[in-house]
Amino acid sequence: MSQKIVITKAGFNALTETDPDNLIFSSDYATLKYYSSGTLSLSISSGDNEDETSVAHNLGYKPFFVVFLELDFSLGAGDWACVPFNLDDTFVRSTVTASVDNTNLYVTAKTTDTFSDIDLNFRYKIFRNSTGL
Amino acid sequence: MAQEIRVSKAGVNVLTATDPNDFIFHSSYNTFKILAEGTLLNQSISATPTEITVSHGQNPSIPVVFGFIKFPDGRVYLPDSMQPSTGTSFKRDWRIYVDDTNIIFRVWEEGGTYTCDIKYYVFETTI
């Protein structure tokens, strides 16, 4: 019989419980492992249609990550949206995307028109989990 | 007194710490378990959108799912990312959907057939 570590929620039997929703931890299931977090700023100049900045993670593989964008240009400082953040109207598409390669995390702002001067603030989390891609 | 299993970060007193962020593990806090994960390599995107479906194995629940795509530029992108192109156009886009049986990846092709790789995760808890 394989050995495992199981911690259930209160009221459940760790020896018999199989529903993962009733387990606080089970060595049968992987979890996300934190690696790093931080902030990024991207200054966009009037007339640009693409700008990008990056931060090094140096993991040597493409990790699981998430990025949030501060919406001080629409909702006000202190409100954050998940990236990517897309804006569409009849004639213009604009997007803020995030991506990784084996070395860096990138945030990229791109529009089919041109931007006005704006500073974008980001917060990111990078996990040790490799996407394997 | 209720018993707990705690592992704190280095430099933090495991007996007195109360901030969940100071713990590597704490048995009072549920962990966000990955129930399943998979990789779809060399997916040909030749229609707009191309639909790729995999079973998530949690039927009849609708689980939290997440994923990443590697576009031909070699970078790995988040869901709903429109890949920037040169000039003033966008080349590619993709989204993840989930129902009680499947994860559905819709990947858009604009400007030519290409191949991509997808990594997906099925997490504990339903949406």
Image (cartoon, rainbow, N blue to C red):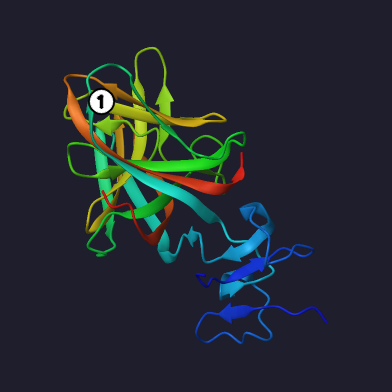
- Please state the horizontal and vertical placement of residue A74, each as a whole percent of the image: 52, 34
Where on the picture, by quarter, is residue B41? top left
Which residue is rendered at x = 46% and y = 60% of the image?
A: A32
Depicted B22 relative to depicted A117: above or below: below
Depicted B37 relative to depicted A111: above or below: below
Drawn side of residue A14 relative to residue B82, left or right:
right
Drawn side of residue A25 relative to residue A32, left or right:
right
- Please state the horizontal and vertical placement of residue B113, each as a whole percent of the image: 17, 22
Which residue is rendered at x = 36% and y = 52% of the image?
A: A41
Q: Nearer the viewer, residue B2 or B108?
A: B2
- Which amino acid type is marked by label 1? Phe
Q: Give the chain of mark 1.
A: B
Which residue is rendered at x = 66% and y = 65% of the image?
A: B29
- List the single residue furthest toward the top: A90
Where on the picture, by quarter, is residue B90? top left
Depicted A41 relative to depicted B117: above or below: below
The answer to whether residue A82 of the structure is visible from this angle is: no
Q: Nearer the viewer, residue A117 or A93?
A: A93
Identify residue for label 1. B90
Which residue is rendered at x = 54% and y = 56% of the image?
A: B33
Drawn side of residue A97 relative to residue A133, left or right:
right
Crowding at mark 1 (Cα within 10 Å: few <14, some 14-19, many 20+):
many
Drawn side of residue A124 relative to residue A133, left or right:
right
The answer to whether residue A37 of the structure is visible from this angle is: yes
- Please state the horizontal and vertical placement of residue A31, each as a whole percent of the image: 49, 60
The count of marks equals 1
Label 1: which secondary element: strand
- List the single residue furthest toward the right: B1
- Please state the horizontal and vertical placement of residue A50, each as a whole percent of the image: 24, 35
Q: Nearer the viewer, residue B106 or B100?
A: B100
Where on the picture, by quarter, is residue B21? bottom right
Q: Nearer the viewer, residue A114 or A24?
A: A24
